[in-house]
Image: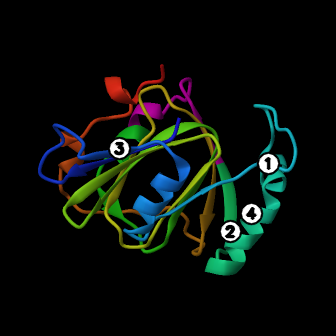
Amino acid sequence: MSELRIYQEASAARAEAAYTGYEDIRRALDKIGVGFERWEASKQLDTEASQDEVIEAYRDAIDRLMKAYGFKSVDVISLYASHPQKEAMRDKFLHEHTHDDFEVRFFVEGEGLFNIRKDGHVYAMRCAQGDLISVPANTTHWFDMGPNPNLKAIRLFTTPEGWVANFTGDNIADRFPRLEAPHYTAG
């Protein structure tokens, strides 16, 4: 289930707002320049679908974004609990960073937790299957795929280099709930 929790940057003790409805999430994220959409596949996909099959199932939405924002490439990333480098990858994404490019992710399967720091707040956006999040360039954020990742996501890039992080060196991510925290677990 998609969920947005908004915290004061200085305290992760209690969220000052929480939203689960699509329009409420979209409006709250729009106020800080973060895009949020829901997409549906044009055809049924199974868990073994290839990158080309996944991209084709979402071709209309992908083409719309590529045209609107000048994206030059698209790919699909899959991370599962059995991935041999899951701990190293999780650690890398959990450090606050920015990008010179948008960070656009569409969740074909699974979930992940984007944390965006903006205007004295942390926006903790738990994305689930069907969600697209677009974090603008130069926006401080971090991402948690959880200790046992389960996600397949479409990524769009305007640069040929793809995912390049500029780490801030701030340890803010250590103070906020992770995906495995009790209020982020499914159930």
Disc 1 versus disc 2: distance between alpha carbons?
A: 19 Å
- Above or below: residue 76 compared with residue 69: above
Above or below, comparing residue 160 to residue 173 in the picture: below
| Structural distance between the alpha carbons of marks 1 and 4 | 9 Å
Task: Using the numbered discs, state the Cα–Cα distance from disc 2 to disc 4 in whole angstroms.
Answer: 14 Å
Q: Look at label 2 and name its amino acid.
A: Ser
Query: Per the image, is 67 magenta?
Result: no
Residue topped by disc 2: 73
Dot 1 corresponds to which residue?
41
What number is the disc on residue 61? 4
Rounded to the nearest angstrom, the CA distance separating label 1 from label 3 is 28 Å
- Disc 4 versus disc 3: distance between alpha carbons? 28 Å
Whole-percent x and y of residue 140? Answer: 31, 63
- Going by the numbered disc 3, the residue's amino acid type is Ala
Q: CA distance from mark 3 to mark 2?
A: 34 Å
List x then y, in percent, for residue 109: 65, 37
In the image, residue 83 lies in the stretch drawn in magenta: yes
**Residue type for callout 4:** Ala
Numbered tag placed on residue 18 in the rendering: 3
- Classify residue 2 as left or right of residue 7: right
Residue numbers of the magenta segment: 77-88
Mark 3 vs mark 2: in front: 3
| Crowd rating for badge 3 (residues with CA inside 10 Å; few <14, some 14–19, many 20+) | some
Q: Residue at x 47, y 33 (%)?
A: 86
Tell me which label, 3 or 2, sits earlier in the chain: 3
Whether label 3 touches label 2, CB < 8 Å? no
Q: Residue 164: which numbered mark, if any?
A: none
- At a point 71% along the width and 79% down the height, the residue shown is 67
